[in-house]
Image (cartoon, rainbow, N blue to C red):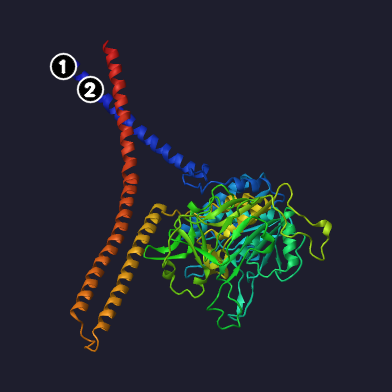
Amino acid sequence: MTTTNDNNTAPKTVSARSKTYSYGSLLLLLIIFVALVMLSSQLLTGMRMDLTENRLYTLSDGTRNILQNLEEPVNLYLFFSEDASADLPQIRSYARRVRELLEEFANHSSGELRVHFVDPKPFSEEEDLAAAYGLQAAPVGASGDTLYFGVAGTNAFDDVQSMPFLQPAKEQFLEYDLAKMVSSLGAPEKRVVGLMSSLPMTAGYDPATQQMREPWAIYEQMQQLFDVRDIDPAGSELPEDIEVLMLVHPRELSQSLQYQVDQFVLGGGRVILFVDPFAEIDRGDPNDPMASMSAGSASPLPDFAASWGVNFDATRTVGDLEYGIGTPTSRHIGIISVPTAGLNADDIVSADLEVVNFTSTGWFSPEEGATTRFEPLIQTSANAAPFDASQFRFLTDPATLLDGFTPTGQRYTLGARLSGPASSAFEAAPEGFAAEDHLAEAGEEGINVLLFADVDALTDRVWVQRQAFLGQSILTPFADNGAMAVNAVDNMLGNSDLISIRTRASSSRPFERVESLQAAAELNYRETEQGLQQELAETERKLTELQAARGDEDLMVLSPEQQDEVQRFVDRKLEIRQELRHVQHELRSDIEKLGTRLKLLNIALVPLLVMAAAGLLALRRRSRSRSANDAQAA
């Protein structure tokens, strides 16, 4: 009995010890886990895995190059009010993101960039410093507290630049804005860009509104990045120190100025040319009461471009049924929103842009036998066709542009690069220029010119929205037109670093398959609708003929023939309306089917793959277990 009791007690004691060890192990693991979490929040700050398609949260190569090539020491100050932001978790989270990014900047700068974090408490010297740097304080709550959240930068020359208030909604532009600030402070001497335009791109007085006008957003951006020299198109002198020349809607240039541009290009100068068959922004004479109604003017290729081997028709515009903005039943084919499918991914000017908008645009094509190389940068879809630019002059209903519109199946080039051998458009130097200095052709490197067939693409309404915020004008781009223009200048100056950062700005992803389905349905819908209109006109014609054939009879009473014709038309009209609804239903059905397939892929495929992997792993373990058992049995 004693032996039995001893044997029964021993297993219970071992079981109790096992439970104690298990609970102790779990408690130890819990302590270790909590400790690791606390340590990781301190030791692994800023570390992350970037799984986004464009790697939006990874420091770009362009930023690293800018930081490693700083010519002057730069100081950046992040002003953030800790106490005032206590109840603003979104702001605090974004501030942590900014701080981590600035620390990453400093780590890659080889000591040339120094970052300072400042908490500007009320009535402190730090608050005075923030105000001196031009930062704006935002009111928080009803207590009267103010929140500072901005960045200021200085260099050894006492230059100051600032970002008055950082908005979380513009996080995708954060790296570019900071890199641009560091680049301009680290290399104080800006490159010289000449701007010649017959349009009011700069700030000034607007006679039409009798108010001061703001400069175009693209002009403001260029001033921040470059030393912009405004050149009077009515003048006769081209500055000698410009490195890149941008011409926007050049009209009625003097022969002297045209010759200088010709020689500038042949001598290795870089030119960016914007022309337009119908520049809507050109409002004409403000004293002419009809000017606003008939706004729009053309700018053909200037004389100096005659030898570049490119064609441009200043009387024709191009419409696009697929890239035109709008819905399948209401599309404006004259306003073209070009997605990535229409952008050249192999050229740094257009690579990685997401969407560029054009309105009443023309197009370029290479001349047969041209010596220059014609490289398209921006193109329409194949559902495009040209039409007369005069249709825009008194356009009130964009739907009228669809009348008789038939896509040609050709893609039209809206932006292009010209390079290679070229000759002068002038046989000899005009009077007043030295004949011996005349360049008859370009040097070994040839010319390098960028062409764009729309001037309105640079206007604010096409690509950016302005908003007033704390006394500042905040620009929120909805298209990449600004990036395209500045990319062009940077590329011509040989600066590719900022381009590689700027083109990461937008993260929108259009549903290209859905847009293609909508374009096809719209074409079918339009053809059916036009058929209905033709049948309506034919029925009205027949009714008029029948009524006229009745002579002096009561015109208010329909004859049996007229009644039959009217009933036939009513029946047919109902049928065609059913056909139109069927087209729309088919469109929705195709889109819903596409959505269902995507949902199945995203929701069901991954779990199925995980289950399949788990099943294979289980089978593999069973196989190993059986092999081990068989070996032991043997």
- Per the image, the residue denoted by label 2 is 9
Reply above or below: 291 against 103: below
Left or right: 475, with 508 as reference point: right
Mark 1 or 2, closer to the camera: 2
Residue at the location (60% across, 66% down)?
A: 123
Q: Quadrant of the N terminus?
A: top left
Report if residue 182 is visible in the image: no
- Label at residue 233: none
Reply above or below: 471 against 60: below
| Residue 531 sits in quarter | bottom left
**Relative image position of residue 254 (x, y in whole percent):** 72, 69
Q: As shown in the figure, which amino acid type bears the numbered disc 1?
A: Met
Pick the residue in front: 524 or 11: 524
Mark 1 and mark 2: Cα distance apart in space: 12 Å
Instruction: Of the two numbered discs 1 and 2 on the same chain, state the one appearing first in sequence.
Output: 1
Q: Residues within 10 Å of mark 1 (few under 14, many from 20)?
A: few
Q: As shown in the figure, which amino acid type bears the numbered disc 2?
A: Thr
- Per the image, the residue denoted by label 1 is 1
Report if residue 186 is visible in the image: yes
Left or right: 100, with 32 as reference point: right
**Relative image position of residue 119 (x, y in whole percent):** 58, 58
**Relative image position of residue 585 (x, y in whole percent):** 28, 59
Q: Residues within 10 Å of mark 2 (few under 14, many from 20)?
A: few
Residue at the location (42% across, 66% down)?
A: 402
